[in-house]
Image: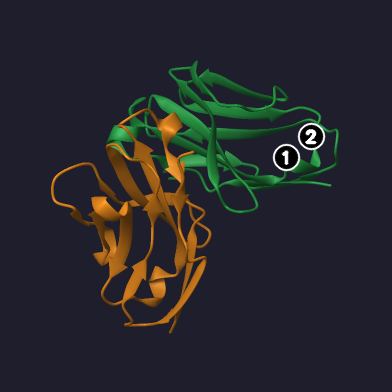
Chain colours: A orange, B green
Amino acid sequence: AQSVSQHNHHVILSEAASLELGCNYSYGGTVNLFWYVQYPGQHLQLLLKYFSGDPLVKGIKGFEAEFIKSKFSFNLRKPSVQWSDTAEYFCAVNPGYSSASKIIFGSGTRLSIRP
Amino acid sequence: DTAVSQTPKYLVTQMGNDKSIKCEQNLGHDTMYWYKQDSKKFLKIMFSYNNKELIINETVPNRFSPKSPDKAHLNLHINSLELGDSAVYFCASSQDTLAGVTGELFFGEGSRLTVL
């Protein structure tokens, strides 16, 4: 069955540290890839997305993600985190450009930033 | 203005009761969804409506019945609540049925349902 794995359940970093959150998916064909973020007390919102073209995608608030097809990965990165980045991060995959019913979410990674 | 709003935010109830969660979006979107987030935080789609018409109905017990009086509202009614129904339910909307292509799902803040 298709799945999305986020291996880091809880990541704790100090401010200014670099961040990389892992995301791997199991689907061999064309995919659309997303990262959503949920700040404390707020709704899930789109951070960035990949459809095609440059595998390095830039998102809001200095985040970026790199699609590595050979590794079935779409890791999220940020060179220097801030306290305000404390949130839950969800990776999501839509296999085969299909409808919303096929979007598969990972279980999320909680990011805690120490001031 | 909240784009996608859900009520109630928290709901604690006894097994066997019937309860509803309401959702409204003011984005003018055509499509609305209900997702369930289980204890392991996996988000799974339950239903989707496009212009008041049901287009996605995943494997969900028929105790769950969505209702869309208009394209800005999608309510979720649950009959005979069971312990396993405890979860966070998220409403979402998108511009059209091709949310997978645009990738832009707009979520509500979630409704945490606890069944005792």
Q: Residue at x 43, y 18 (%)?
A: B51
Q: Numbered disc 2: what chain?
A: B
**Mark number, residue A17:** none
Tell me residue A103's x, y (percent): 42, 37
Taking the spot 56% from the left edge, 26% from the top edge, the residue there is B58
Name above or below for residue A67 compared with residue A32: below
Which one is in front, B5 or B102?
B102
Seen in the image, is A62 located left or right of residue B97? left
Q: Which residue does the numbered mark 2 point to in the structure image?
A: B81
Provide residue A25's location: percent of width, then percent of height.
39, 49
Q: Looking at this rendering, what residue extends furthest in the left direction? A: A53
Asked if disc 2 and disc 1 are in contact, CB closer than 8 Å, the reply is: yes
Question: Which residue is pictured at 54% across the width and 39% down the height?
Answer: B44
Q: Secondary structure at mark 1?
A: helix
- Compare residues A77 and B72 and report the one nearer the observer: A77
| Secondary-structure class at tag 2 | loop
Q: Is residue B64 left or right of residue B44?
A: right
Q: Decide if residue B26 is in sight here.
A: no
Vertical side of B81 occupied by A79: above or below: below
Q: Position of residue A64 (x, y in %)?
A: 25, 61
Q: Quadrant of residue B13?
A: top right
Residue A93 on image: x %, y %: 37, 43
Q: How many marks?
A: 2
Amino acid type indicated by mark 1: Asp
Query: How many other residues sit within 10 Å of disc 2, few (<14), some (14-19) or many (≥20)?
Result: many
Task: Give amino acid for label 2.
Answer: Leu
Circle 1 residues within 10 Å: few <14, some 14–19, many ≥20: some
Which numbered marker is on residue B85?
Answer: 1
Chain containing mark 1: B
- How many angstroms separate mark 2 from mark 1 (CA)? 7 Å
| Residue A58 can be seen, yes or no | yes
